[in-house]
Image (cartoon, grey):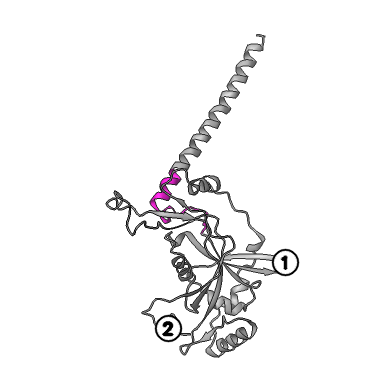
Amino acid sequence: MTDASSSPDKAPSFEMTWGSSASSGYCSEEEPDSEFEQFFTARTSFFPKVRKPQLSDVKQDEQIECGKQELTTADIQQKVKEYNAQINSNLFMNMNKDGSYTGFVKVQFKLVRPVSVPHPKKGGHDAPGRKASGVKRRTSFYLPKDASKHLHISSRTSAREVIEALLKKFTVVDNPGKFALFERSERHDQVYVRKLSDDEHPLRLRLAAGPNEKVLSFLLKENETGEVNWHAFSMPELKNFLRILQREEEEHIKQIVQRYALARTKMQEALAGSTPG
């Protein structure tokens, strides 16, 4: 294999092996009562709860320490040789003359929200009246649970580039900033999950950990940062959120008014039944 990132002037190239197909459950964003809107109504909170420290946060940097170390070419060659000796498939790693190497990483999809893809065109063109609108139509659907994909990448490929390549393979038009790459490991009967920074290199982590998926695996999840990055959402999504926010506000106002009305009624009944004294 040739290194996809051997030239600084070329963008990394990616290959992918397909292991599953996209699920059904399509819903158009143009339908106001679609499953897409119901999903966010049921599961999206505009006021996220404060996250309590988890056991998986403890010493989470230890497992990737060797993955950040700068290795000599001889060390890399030895590790690649040891890695290839442990796998029973053709997903080998290969050294390049410039000291970089290529290989495969498996990424599992752990998405709870639907993703958006371009709306399929009917008859090769949009319906009459839509062409001049300039509005790009989208279709949202849920990816299969526990779906996974293999990417052929370079040791120079960053976590952000892996995310962009995965979305491109699925023709997902959502902003890549809405997603993040995580590493998962099992140690001492405990599961540890850590979010990768954009400039980390997944293949280096893969080589350092070896091919065992229990030692290290990669997950694609929503980018939960505590604060919502509204600029990462499309215009239809933002309009949908505003409708949901208005409904939540109206419901909270209704509950508060009912609560005070009930308290006022009980106070008035108590006053009416009491005798002056």
The residue indicated by pointer 1 is 189
Residue type indicated by callout 2: Ser
State how many labels appear. 2
Spatial CA distance of label 2 from label 1 is: 40 Å
Q: Nearer the viewer, residue 35 or 86?
A: 35
Outermost residue on the front side: it is 123
Image point (59%, 75%), residue name: 65
Q: Secondary structure at mark 2?
A: loop
- In percent of width and height, residue 253 lies at 51, 32
Q: Is residue 237 magenta?
A: yes
Which class describes the residues within 10 Å of circle 2: few (<14), some (14-19), or many (20+)? some
User: Mark 2 or 1 closer to N-term?
Assistant: 2
Image point (63%, 82%), residue name: 88
- In the rendered image, which quarter contains the C terminus? top right
Q: What mark, if any, has residue 108 been given in the picture?
A: none
Outermost residue on the top side: it is 276
- In percent of width and height, residue 181 lies at 53, 66
Q: Nearer the viewer, residue 155 or 269?
A: 155
Q: Are marks 2 and 1 in contact (CB under 8 Å)?
A: no
Image point (52%, 31%), residue name: 254
Q: Is residue 233 magenta?
A: yes
The residue indicated by pointer 2 is 6
Q: Nearer the viewer, residue 36 or 276?
A: 36
Image point (41%, 47%), residue name: 30
Outermost residue on the left side: it is 132
Q: Secondary structure at mark 1?
A: loop
Which class describes the residues within 10 Å of circle 1: few (<14), some (14-19), or many (20+)? few
Q: Classify 98 as above or below 138.
A: below
- In percent of width and height, residue 89 lies at 60, 81
Q: Classify 64 as above or below 81.
A: above
Q: Which residues are magenta?
A: 223-242
Residue type indicated by callout 1: Asp
